[in-house]
């Protein structure tokens, strides 16, 4: 009887390891990608802005839009892209940039590029009092990114990410600046995880 229980326990552990291994290696897929239309020579990209849901729009002096674009730029450069930015990024976006017509996004690019990219933040929370303990302070952000063909003016790719930093997991350390930086860094990394590297084609038909 003991041997039977041991064998079942071993079988359960093997199956559990297989399931966990499969979850860990399963490739993530974007919300949308037009693999057939993807330009194989796409190497340049223009960041044309960050928009915020009006319910979560931060104060202009927070500089959050520029911080998001700084982190996005670093991720895109790591993927091999030459990144261009418009001269002015401090205007208040009244539209969700993930829904404006593709030609409008392309028109915002400072120069001809292969891809035009925009980010829309649809959820944002940052604790007002970092001395609080119940609940512990935290930084949470969710966003969607969109890439448009800079020449054909049509959508090529979309994906989203949701990040939570701080909170109970960060105890006993409380550092609002660190939580925010980590949150934005992880947001950019996760948001563009499924974007093909420069000069490569996405997997798919």
Image (tube, rainbow, N blue to C red):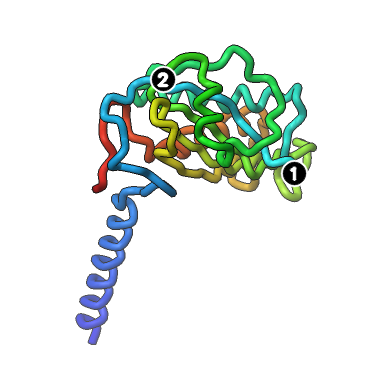
In the figure, is residue 150 to the left or right of 68? Answer: left
Q: Are marks 1 and 2 in contact (CB under 8 Å)?
A: no
Residue 197 sits above or below residue 44 on the image: below
Looking at the image, tell me whether mark 1 or mark 2 is earlier in sequence order: 1
Residue 188 image point, x, y percent? 49, 33
Residue tagged by mark 1?
A: 55
Residue 55 image point, x, y percent? 75, 44
**Which residue is painted at 58% across and 37% down in the image?**
100
Q: Secondary structure at mark 2?
A: loop
Q: Please state, as top left, top right, bottom left or bottom right, where the N terminus lies in the image.
A: bottom left
Residue 194 image point, x, y percent? 37, 40
Q: Residues within 10 Å of mark 1 (few under 14, many from 20)?
A: few
**Which residue is painted at 36% across and 48% down in the image?**
28
**Which residue is painted at 39% across and 26% down in the image?**
151
Residues at marks 1 and 2, CA–CA distance in whole angstroms: 33 Å
Query: In terms of depth relative to the viewer, which is nearer, 195 or 25?
Result: 195
Question: Extreme top residue here?
Answer: 87
Residue 38 visible? The answer is yes
Residue tagged by mark 2?
A: 113
Image quadrant in which you'd find residue 21: bottom left
Query: In terms of depth relative to the viewer, which is nearer, 12 or 178?
Result: 178
């Amino acid at each position: 009887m003991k041997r039977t229980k041991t064998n079942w326990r071993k079988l359960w552990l093997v199956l559990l390891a297989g399931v966990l291994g499969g979850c860990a290696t399963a490739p993530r897929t974007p919300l949308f990608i037009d693999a057939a239309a993807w330009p194989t020579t796409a190497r340049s990209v223009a960041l044309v802005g960050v928009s915020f849901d009006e319910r979560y729009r931060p104060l202009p002096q927070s500089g959050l839009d520029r911080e998001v674009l700084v982190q996005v730029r670093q991720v895109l450069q790591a993927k091999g892209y030459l990144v261009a930015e418009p001269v002015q990024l401090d205007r208040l976006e009244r539209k969700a940039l993930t829904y404006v017509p593709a030609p409008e996004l392309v028109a915002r690019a400072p120069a001809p590029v292969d891809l035009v990219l925009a980010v829309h933040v649809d959820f944002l929370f940052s604790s007002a009092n970092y001395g609080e303990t119940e609940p512990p302070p935290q930084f949470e952000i969710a966003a969607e990114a969109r890439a448009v063909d800079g020449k054909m003016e049509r959508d090529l790719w979309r994906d989203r990410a949701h990040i939570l930093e701080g909170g109970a997991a960060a105890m006993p350390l409380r550092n609002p600046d660190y939580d925010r930086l980590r949150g934005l860094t992880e947001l950019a990394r996760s948001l563009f995880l499924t974007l093909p590297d420069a000069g490569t084609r996405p997997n798919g038909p």
